[in-house]
Image: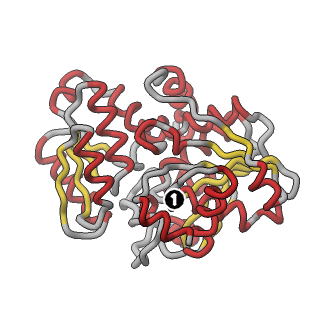
């Protein structure tokens, strides 16, 4: 039995067990984006989830399933910010100590937020993937569970509860657009929708400056590549060798799309103008992906996952100028 066979059941179980700790987020129709694109656009408001991103779902599911000894020992993770914040809050609510390894290039706002939620934060020089590998090494040395931001079936099942909600809120969707970094979010949503509504197209969206997993899918193997700076810091970074999200994405994604930094900025501005929401770069990637492929979905009902809102105000204002 493969992980894809077991995921739908795990997602259904998480969908029930995580309430009311994890909020059911609105699926909000956007008249402005619909007029602009010619699609019937609905925004899945994960930026309104606790800690300002979808990551709280997977983190809550992972910690829920620890045994008592693991809970007492605490967990270690690596994060550019949102996963760390989600895990810190989940740990605070469940009494589980959380240590987060971050790259020293991570957003100071996100580092402060993690510390504010009670996590111990350890900053290391290096790119996100090298920090992640060091965190995993430390977890092994200390005998604590390592909570991967994406390479973990229980994390993926937690993120997949978004797919359950999408089906309950709009069973007649034609497509869903999701920003992709390590692939945990889109794997969970894709697994849920494949079980519930297999006709829905699951479309992975990447910044052209940081498309490691997308390029890996094209190559048929996980590759390393030099990424450029991107507004979508939440999706930046390489993919762990042997990541379970790689075969899941191979099976679950109907297609992929790359968007430029200018397109991400424009999408963030459009959401602010039409819907009055501040969203972070990764959420802008999903909106930009929808806008780029809008010609193929004229009159169709599409959902765009607004995965988070955690962006420094000055950076947001600069992006939308």
Helix, strand or loop at label 1? It is helix
Return the x and y of residue 99 as percentages of the image width and height: 20, 44
On the image, the x and y values in percent for residue 166 come to: 67, 36
Residue at coordinates 60% horizontally, 53% vertically from top-left? 178
What percent of the width, then of the height, locates residue 318? 48, 71
Residue sitting nearer the eye, 248 or 17: 17
Specify whether 233 is left or right of 264. left
Q: Is residue 256 visible?
A: no
Residue 321 falls in which quadrant of the image?
Answer: bottom right
Q: At 49% across and 27% down in the image, what residue appears?
A: 14
Quadrant in which residue 105 is drawn: bottom left
Q: Which residue carries the number 1 mark?
A: 282
Q: Is disc 1 surrounded by few (<14), some (14 to 19) or many (20+) residues within 10 Å?
A: many
Vertical position of residue 132 compared to residue 214: above or below:
above
Judging from the image, the colouring scheme is: secondary structure
Rendered residue at 28%/32% (across/down): 91
**Compared to 212, does 136 lie above or below?**
above
Instruction: Indicate whether 113 appears above or below 205.
Output: above
Asked if one can make out residue 68 in the rendered structure from this viewpoint, the answer is yes
Q: Does 112 sit left or right of 306 as displayed? A: left
Residue farthest toward the left in the current orientation of the protein: 142
> Is residue 47 toward the left or the right of residue 229 in the image?
right
């Amino acid at each position: 039995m493969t992980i894809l066979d077991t995921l739908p059941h795990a997602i259904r179980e998480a969908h029930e067990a995580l309430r009311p700790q994890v909020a059911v987020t609105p699926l909000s129709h956007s008249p402005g984006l619909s007029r602009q694109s010619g699609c019937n656009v609905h925004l899945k408001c994960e930026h309104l989830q606790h800690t300002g991103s979808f990551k709280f779902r997977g983190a809550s599911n992972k910690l829920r399933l620890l045994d008592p000894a693991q809970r007492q020992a605490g967990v270690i993770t690596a994060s550019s910010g949102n996963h760390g914040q989600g895990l810190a809050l989940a740990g605070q609510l469940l009494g589980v100590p959380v240590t987060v390894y971050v790259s020293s290039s991570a957003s100071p706002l996100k580092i402060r937020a993690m510390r504010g939620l009670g996590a111990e934060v350890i900053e290391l020089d290096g790119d996100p993937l090298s920090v992640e590998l060091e965190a995993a090494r430390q977890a092994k040395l200390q005998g604590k569970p390592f909570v991967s931001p994406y390479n973990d079936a229980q994390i993926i099942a937690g993120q997949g509860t978004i797919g359950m909600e999408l089906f309950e809120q709009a069973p007649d969707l034609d497509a869903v657009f999701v920003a992709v970094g390590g692939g945990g979010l889109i794997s969970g949503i894709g697994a849920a929708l494949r079980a519930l509504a297999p006709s829905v197209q699951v479309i992975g969206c990447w910044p052209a400056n940081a498309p490691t997993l997308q390029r890996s899918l094209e190559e048929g193997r996980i590759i390393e590549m030099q990424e450029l700076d991107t507004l979508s810091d939440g999706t930046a970074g390489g993919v762990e060798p042997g990541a379970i999200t790689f075969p899941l994405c191979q099976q679950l994604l109907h297609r992929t799309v790359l968007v430029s930094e200018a397109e991400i900025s424009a999408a963030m501005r459009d959401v602010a103008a039409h819907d009055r929401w501040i969203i972070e770069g990764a959420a802008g990637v999903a909106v930009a992906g929808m806008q780029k492929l809008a010609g193929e979905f004229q009159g169709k009902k599409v959902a765009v996952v607004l995965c988070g809102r955690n962006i420094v105000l000055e950076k947001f204002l600069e992006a939308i100028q």
